[in-house]
Amino acid sequence: MTTPRAAVILAAGKSTRMKSSRSKVLHHVGGRSMLSWVADLARSAGADKIVCVVGEGNADVRAAAEELGLEIALQEPQLGTGHAVKCAQGALSGFKGNMAVLYADTPFVSHKTLERVFKSLDNGTDVTVLGFEPEEPGFYGRLITEGGELTAIVEARDASNEILDIGLCNSGVIAASTQDMFSALERVGNDNVKGEYYLTDIVEILRGDDKTARVITADESEVLGVNSRLDLATAEVAFQMGMRQAMLTKGVTLRDPDTTYFSWDTAISADAEIGANVVFGPGVSIAKDAVIHPFCHLEGAKIGEGAQIGPFARLRPGTEMAAGTKAGNFVETKKAKIGKGSKINHLSYIGDAEVGEGANIGAGTITCNYDGYFKHKTEIGDGAFVGTNSSLVAPVKIGKGAYLGSGGVITKDVPEGALAVARSEQVNKEGWADRYNTAQKKRKAKK
């Protein structure tokens, strides 16, 4: 039986290097905040309780954490990582199980890796640290091992030259039972260069209690931390490269991978084809054999099998394109359900609408869905034909098989099978253009 699990997410930093009015952990990578990434990681590992440690100065983090359903612990002042974790002790009062310390600015630790950390505890290790071997160890704390056991963690600023030669580094992620964690934190001192209480000191303390300590390793890409805009850009590049590789591996065609941008939850089936310069916001799913032509932006949209989107189309949240549909060049949709085989070929806005099967929406069609106060729905029946430059003033229903003449402003429901013409009668004035042109030419000649 798996021991109950908890997670403490450290998010109390002041974010000074990000140079932003928004706390750094709320900046997005792959379409969602770093805090959201780490909260999802904790949940995926089966954490029964998740505590987010915040500071007084980052109320935005507290609000976001509460929205994510996390419990809150306050760290003020900030006296180091050990102090931060200790601040979560009250929120974990009465919890008996294992806990992992995670970091809200380290979004890419995988579920499999965190599961390995917890499993290490389940298998009898008392404290487990996640390590990695970077190309440039630099400022990272070093993990000192002997005979397969972790004996100490030494911060780079406190390390000797001999210790700095060690390539195995500390990611910051550390796990132990709540009892051992808080027992050790009570004994952590601040006799170091910065005068802070280091979480890493618990390793030596617990080993002094005859506890075992081991290292689980991960790839450097998983423990990439974000402290600045440069780090944020680096993280985004790493995320996009990973998504592109994953999509190509599963059988998705990317015509120009370097210009295709994904979100964390983009779901594309094998045999779909994605053109150059396509951006996926959150909440997009694409079925097999669909084609997304170049220069499209999709967010919150569901694309059916064999659908054709773009080029230069924008599909906004709530869009559902059924199998065999088309939204062509310079088409924008929002909260629109488009039935099987229906086509919106070009230069149209279809919002707050439901279109049946086999309908044709002519160029320049607009669903006029907003009256200045409220949004209203347009319904277009199966097989309807909407002529070019039609304005459909919602709420309005176009019946099955109805035909709308071009240029109409449709303000009333159109029955099934009916023709609706809603424009002024054309009047031709014979000879008017000839007289106008002659007069204007004479006028111009005199100047």
Image: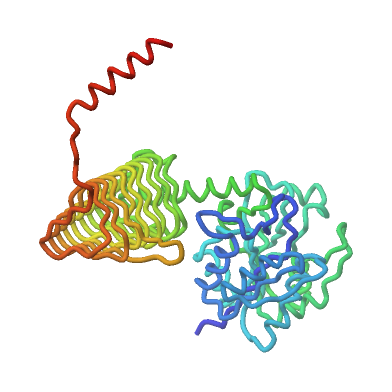
In x, y percent, where is residue 42? 56, 71
Q: Nearer the viewer, residue 144 or 341?
A: 341
In x, y percent, where is residue 369? 36, 60
Q: Residue at x 62, y 55 (%)?
A: 132
In x, y percent, where is residue 251? 30, 50
Instruction: Please give left or right for residue 296 compared with residue 151 in the image.
Output: left
Residue 271 shows up from this direction: no
Q: Nearer the viewer, residue 139 or 359?
A: 359
Q: Name which quarter of the figure residue 182 lies in.
A: bottom right
In x, y percent, where is residue 200? 75, 65
Applied colour scheme: rainbow
Farthest-out residue, bottom: 94
| 14 relative to 447, above or below | below
Q: Nearer the viewer, residue 44 or 426?
A: 426
Q: Residue at x 64, y 78 (%)?
A: 71
Total count of labels: 0
Farthest-out residue, left: 417
Q: Residue at x 23, y 27 (%)?
A: 432
Q: Name which quarter of the figure residue 176 lies in.
A: bottom right
Residue 184 shows up from this direction: yes
Instruction: Please give left or right for residue 156 compared with residue 427 in the image.
Output: right
Instruction: Please give left or right for residue 54 compared with residue 296 in the image.
Output: right
Quadrant where the C terminus is found in the figure: top left
